[in-house]
């Protein structure tokens, strides 16, 4: 605020009149009058400036570091106008939003050295009325004449203060103070102060935006580089710096020069960066970066930036995502994560509780795992639980059923394949890198493929089929499941000995349902509860007499068969109670004559009985002799 020149003698009389008589002359500026009254009420000493409200040296150093950007920037601004400061004996102060002097520039302030005023709080409560307190109170620039200052030793010169606002909030106050009673170019000083205020606000706002942009870039899952001709890196985000450091690039403070990609990337001249400097952009291209430490495979985009007068590209931006990180993102987006935890596996009986506890211990080590047990015992759920309880839980969980494909397709699915120069498909082994690969029905994996997988796991490296020049690093934990006795198959030469030795260091044997009958009531009620929740239907009750029926059955198909039987009962029982008569141990296969003509119906009944003739005869209410005829008719093996 530019104020017209006032007579110092009159201002001195107004001040004395208020101090001695408590009377405010109507010619006193209202903001000054208000501040005088407040200073008097607070009992602020008027003879000498109070500097006792000073931060400790440690606290002040910490505060200065917090505001280093503003301090250094204002120092650069004031350096160029030092002669102007000297001509009018001006001092410049930078004050924070708590009215603590962060820095004193140029000449002494209030005849004090910078060391005497820095770190001192100079708000209204401490030093009374000043241009600082008025500018702070009203959030406006304010010029104050010397005799209006509350402290008498500060009345020699005039002062002007302006708030520095960022985002509408006052962050700092900058103050210019004259030390002598000389006529000063008020408009020039205020213009200078407002220019410094505007410049500091612009700088700090830009710094906030820059920090936000850097924070965003540092939080991304891709490396970003701003590259100058010859490979010099003008900027890189956090991931980019980490990758360069891992491959041996020296930091700028170590070498005195910027990082250079050409120094650490052996095939730099064959990368899209070089094409970028020829003006050729690349988008989402799979690129191999060869270094002395490691070979990286990335999905890379290179964008040429501004050109010089001769249309030569001056710099390029490189955005590069490691394929292993991309795999993890895709795995999570596609649902390649554990759907079950070990705690979700129901059963409080001693037999199953000990297995679950062992699985929890095994999950925490680094060994590959073999899960053995009859079909339907919950091996897949156990595999999910082990992955989730392991230190690889953040990585993908990739599954592959070894019995679902021919040996040729299984090998392609496992290792990936290159078809021509443009088409290359990654295998499940690569997809699972950083996580877990669950191999179900592992006993059906051909021995040559298992041998090849064992070699890849031992080396930590793999090749895609049809690709010999590129070696890919893998970091995979195998969790394998088997219905058979894998050790016996290995001893008979029917399974890879090398692969068995790798996965058999931690073996978990999941018990059959008939050997843990005490868990059937809890399991059954849990299944009914899950069905109700999953299909948003009312929960149905399982009375004790129904549970007794379930407990007395042998369950050759284990939990999977129990699930099927209860699903059929849940959806086909009217009312809210599932009684014993609602339980069909063959699920949707009814004991009528359809099985005599329909092989699929008979086969489902045969599977429900676990391939046991006596059990099936009881279920269908026919003789064993009759069943033998139909077993022969449908080419099924009797037990």
Image (tube, rainbow, N blue to C red):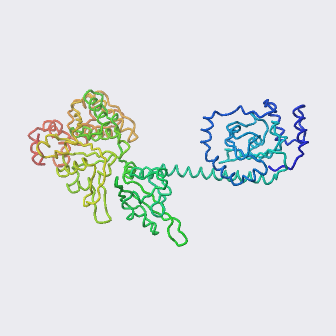
In the image shown, does 540 or 371 lie closer to the viewer? 371
- Residue 73 x, y percent position in the rendering: 64, 50
| Residue pictured at 59% horizontal, 49% vertical | 208
Q: Quadrant of the C terminus?
A: top left
Residue 601 in the figure: left or right of residue 540? left
**Compared to 596, does 262 lie above or below?**
below
Residue 621 in the figure: left or right of residue 574? left
- Residue 276 x, y percent position in the rendering: 45, 66
Image quadrant assignment for residue 41 = top right
**Residue 476 visible, this orientation:** yes
- Residue 464 x, y percent position in the rendering: 27, 57
| Label tally | 0
In the image shown, does 456 or 268 lie closer to the viewer? 268
- Residue 247 x, y percent position in the rendering: 38, 52
Residue 80 in the figure: left or right of residue 504? right
Image quadrant assignment for residue 147 = top right
**Residue 546 visible, this orientation:** no
**Compared to 333, does 626 lie above or below?**
above
Residue 93 in the figure: left or right of residue 266? right
In the image shown, does 115 or 432 lie closer to the viewer? 115
| Residue pictured at 43% horizontal, 49% vertical | 242
């Amino acid at each position: 605020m530019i104020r017209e020149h006032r007579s110092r003698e009159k201002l001195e009389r107004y001040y004395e009149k208020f101090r001695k008589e408590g009377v405010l002359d109507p010619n006193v500026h209202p903001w000054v009058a208000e501040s005088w009254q407040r200073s008097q009420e607070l009992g602020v000493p008027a003879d000498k400036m109070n500097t006792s409200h000073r931060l400790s040296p440690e606290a002040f150093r910490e505060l200065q570091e917090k505001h280093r950007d503003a301090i250094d920037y204002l120092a650069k601004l004031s350096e160029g106008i030092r002669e102007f400061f000297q001509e009018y004996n001006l001092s410049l102060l930078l004050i924070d939003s708590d009215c603590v002097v962060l820095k004193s520039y140029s000449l002494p302030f209030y005849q004090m050295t910078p060391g005497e005023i820095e770190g001192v709080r100079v708000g209204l409560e401490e030093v009374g009325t000043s241009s600082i307190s008025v500018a702070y109170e009203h959030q406006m620039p304010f010029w104050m004449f010397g005799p209006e200052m509350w402290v008498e030793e500060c009345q020699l010169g005039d002062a002007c203060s302006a708030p520095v606002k960022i985002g509408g909030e006052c962050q700092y106050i900058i103050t210019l103070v004259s030390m002598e009673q000389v006529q000063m170019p008020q408009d020039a000083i205020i213009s200078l102060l407002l220019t410094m205020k505007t410049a500091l606000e612009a700088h700090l706002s830009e710094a906030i935006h820059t920090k936000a942009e850097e924070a965003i870039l540092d939080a991304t899952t891709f490396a970003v580089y701003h590259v100058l001709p010859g490979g010099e890196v003008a900027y890189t985000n956090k991931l980019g710096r980490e990758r360069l450091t891992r491959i041996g690039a020296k930091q700028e403070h170590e070498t005195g020069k910027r990082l250079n990609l050409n120094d650490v990337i052996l095939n730099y001249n064959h990368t899209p960066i070089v094409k970028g400097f020829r003006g050729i952009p690349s988008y989402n291209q799979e690129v191999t970066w060869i270094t002395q430490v490691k070979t990286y495979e990335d999905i890379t985009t290179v964008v040429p930036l501004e050109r010089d007068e001769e249309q030569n590209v001056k710099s390029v931006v490189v955005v590069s995502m490691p394929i292993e990180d991309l795999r993890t993102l895709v795995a999570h987006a596609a649902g390649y994560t554990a759907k079950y935890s070990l705690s979700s596996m129901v059963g409080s009986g001693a037999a199953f509780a000990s297995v679950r506890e062992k699985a929890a211990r095994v999950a925490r080590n680094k060994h590959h795992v073999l899960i053995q047990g009859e079909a339907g015992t919950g091996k897949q759920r156990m595999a999910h639980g082990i992955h989730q309880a392991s230190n690889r839980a953040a990585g993908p969980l990739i599954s592959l059923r070894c019995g679902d494909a021919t040996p040729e397709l299984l090998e392609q699915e496992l290792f990936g394949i290159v078809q021509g120069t443009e088409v290359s498909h990654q295998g499940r082994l690569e997809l699972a890198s950083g996580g877990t690969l669950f191999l179900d029905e592992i006993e059906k994996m051909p021995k040559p493929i298992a041998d090849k997988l064992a070699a890849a796991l031992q080396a930590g490296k793999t090749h895609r089929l049809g690709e010999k020049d590129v070696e890919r690093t893998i970091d995979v934990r195998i969790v394998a499941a088997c219905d058979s006795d894998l050790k016996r198959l290995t001893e008979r030469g029917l399974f890879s000995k090398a692969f068995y030795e790798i996965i058999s260091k931690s073996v978990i044997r999941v018990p059959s349902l008939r050997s843990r009958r005490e868990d059937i009531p809890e399991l059954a009620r849990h299944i009914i509860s899950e069905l109700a929740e999953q299909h948003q239907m009312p929960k149905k009750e399982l009375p004790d007499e129904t549970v007794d029926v379930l407990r007395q059955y042998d369950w050759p198909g284990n939990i999977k068969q129990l699930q099927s039987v209860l699903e059929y009962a849940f959806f086909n029982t009217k009312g809210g109670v599932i009684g014993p008569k609602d339980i069909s141990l063959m699920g949707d296969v009814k004991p009528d004559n359809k099985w005599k003509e329909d092989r699929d119906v008979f086969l489902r009944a045969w599977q429900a009985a676990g391939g046991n003739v006596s059990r099936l005869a009881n279920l269908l209410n026919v003789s064993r002799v009759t069943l033998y005829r139909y077993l022969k008719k449908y080419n099924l093996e009797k037990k």
